[in-house]
Amino acid sequence: MQASWLSCISHYIDKITRGLGHAIKWLTLAMVLLTFIIVTLRYGFNIGFIAMQESVLYLHGIVIMLGAAYAYKEDAHVRVDIFYQKFSNKQKALVNALGVLLLLLPVCVFFFYISLDYVLASWRIFEKSSEAGGLPLVYLNKTLILLLPITLFLQGISELCKAITDYQSNEVEGA
């Protein structure tokens, strides 16, 4: 019963993260195309737009900050596999659970906490670009600082559910 409940939670969080990841893939393409346009205009026609250049920075921020949870879900994050690769499935599940509980979730909570005032201050004044012709959306860009720990926290919960399920299923198999 508990395993199916945990699998259900994990499934829904993974579905959200997967959707976010697929959207980010398209934003990455948009960022590359926009960069090509900016470079072509700048060096081919001597035309430059600050707003276009800033939009690439905003897209870059979106891709990195919101793509972290997707990278974690897809196991594309950095891991020291020297010992981990030799572990049994049960040991891997235990390491994954402890990593989420002792490292990922506390870091996400801390990161959210220390960033909250900074982002709220930007929202209070609806912070704009300091560049003439820049985007008036700095406060929205800074919101990504809060979305990173939120999405990583949620994906961490999903990975914790999977680790608990894996640990329990390997415990039953070993019995």
Image (spheres, rainbow, N blue to C red):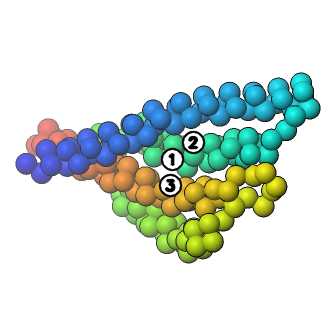
Q: Secondary structure at mark 1?
A: helix
Q: Secondary structure at mark 3?
A: helix
Q: Amino acid at mark 3?
A: Leu
Q: Nearer the viewer, residue 152 or 34?
A: 34
Q: Kindly tell me whether residue 171 is visible in this rendering.
A: no
Residue that appears at 70% across and 52% down? 135
| Discs 3, 1 touching: Cβ within 8 Å | yes
Q: Amino acid at mark 2?
A: Val
Q: Which numbered tag is attached to residue 40?
A: none
Tell me: 114 left or right of 154: right
Give the alpha-carbon distance from disc 3 to disc 1, as whole Å.
6 Å
The quadrant of the picture occupied by the C terminus is top left
Percent across and percent down for residue 100 are 38, 56
Q: Which numbered tag is attached to residue 66?
A: 1
Which residue is under mark 3? 148
Percent across and percent down for residue 81 are 49, 40
**Extreme left residue here?**
1
Which image quadrant for residue 73? Answer: top left
Q: Amino acid at mark 1?
A: Leu
Percent across and percent down for residue 33 are 68, 27
Which callout, 3 or 1, points at the residue further toward the start of the chain?
Answer: 1
Percent across and percent down for residue 96 are 36, 50
Compared with 109, 23 (above or below) is above
Q: Kindly tell me whether residue 152 is visible in this rendering.
A: yes
Which residue is under mark 2? 63
Q: Nearer the viewer, residue 73 or 173?
A: 73
Tell me: 102 left or right of 24: left
Which callout, 3 or 2, points at the residue further toward the start of the chain?
Answer: 2
| Discs 2, 1 touching: Cβ within 8 Å | yes
